[in-house]
Image (cartoon, helix red, strand yellow):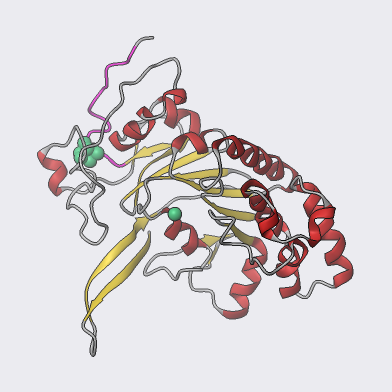
Amino acid sequence: NLKKHFPIKKGAILPKQVGAVKAVDGVSFHVRKGETLGLVGESGCGKSTTGRSILNLIKPTEGEVKYKGQNIAHYKGEQLRQLRKEIQIIFQDPYASLNPRMTVEQIIEEPMRAFKVPASERKPKVEKLLNVVGLSPYHKHRYPHQFSGGQRQRIGIARALSLDPELIICDEPVSALDVSIQAQVVNLMEDLQKEFDLTYIFIAHDLSVVHHISDRVAVMYLGEIVEVGEVEELYKNPKHPYTQALLSAIPEANPHKKRDRIMLEGDLPSPSDPPQGCKFHTRCPFAEEQCKVEHPKLKDVSTGDHQAACHLVNEVVKEPVSG
Ligand code: SF4
Ligand code: MG
């Protein structure tokens, strides 16, 4: 039940809270060891805030984040520092997340320095990590600007691996890259997952990016999870109208059953003033009166591991499209 509400304040001298941006508004999900959970939704839906709250880069307003049975949401100081060995993050923008004044070697060894790993171990580890991410040890004395976007993201990945983490929050790691490079980086991340037994939370705004890498996918809308399920089940049998709309935008997601593109009306409502009832009702082609007043909870929609938050989920049987 994770929540992160950012207060909106007005007044210069004695600022008063006049509202809140409900960036994350009661999110619950689990991630199993060794799996990849794809977390998908339009920009502004709260997926990055969710990712950062897990890492404690942002303090949640409410709720718990459990890691190996411990609530880590309120870790501070040394406890939090130790947690950084196990949970790392890869950022969207490899241009902004690497210090331009540091060499590749300094960048990759920085987390190890912070944990007082001796130089005699750091140096060979940097070389190994450069090999592992498909760069060369000869690159270690160069600076970030001497690399392409894809190579910079490889440097960011090497840095994230330097402390042998177990869980990596991947916050849109390929969104800033050319489409031709995206697949290479995603493939690398899959190989690394197998090699180092990693668990990923893979954030993306596009269902096509997470299809290949995810075991399960969670779809977010306005700070809530509206659907979550095993990847093949969710892509073949999407139950929430929002997921259906997102999937209909990518023809290759389902080459056998051609879906008509579902166009969503209107813009994403403001997370400071979300619609009552089902937050999606202002854009949903199936909205009914009930949807405007009653907030739908996630419920099981079929056998297997699949839930959706829609009142009509067990009622509307969509005509199967033959093909
Ligand atoms: Fe649409 Fe109603 Fe389902 Fe919300 S609850 S997704 S508005 S049908
Ligand atoms: Mg984001």
Residue 8 in picture, x, y percent from top left: 26, 72
Instruction: Magenta stretch: give its range.
Output: 309-321
Residue at the farthest right position: 120
> Is residue 75 part of the magenta span, yes or no?
no
Residue 51 drawn above or below residue 81 = above
> Is residue 318 part of the magenta span, yes or no?
yes
Going by the image, does 260 lie left or right of 281?
right
Q: Is residue 254 visible?
A: yes
Residue at the farthest front position: 146
Q: Residue at x 33, y 14 (%)?
A: 321
Residue at the farthest top position: 323
Q: Residue at x 63, y 62 (%)?
A: 98
Quadrant in which ligand 1 is drawn: top left
Residue 231 in picture, x, y percent from top left: 49, 33
The quarter of the rendered structure image containing the C terminus is: top left
Residue at the farthest left position: 289
42 or 55: which is nearer to us? 42
Residue 150 in picture, x, y percent from top left: 64, 46
Q: Quadrant of residue 137?
A: bottom right
Q: Residue at x 24, y 62 (%)?
A: 272
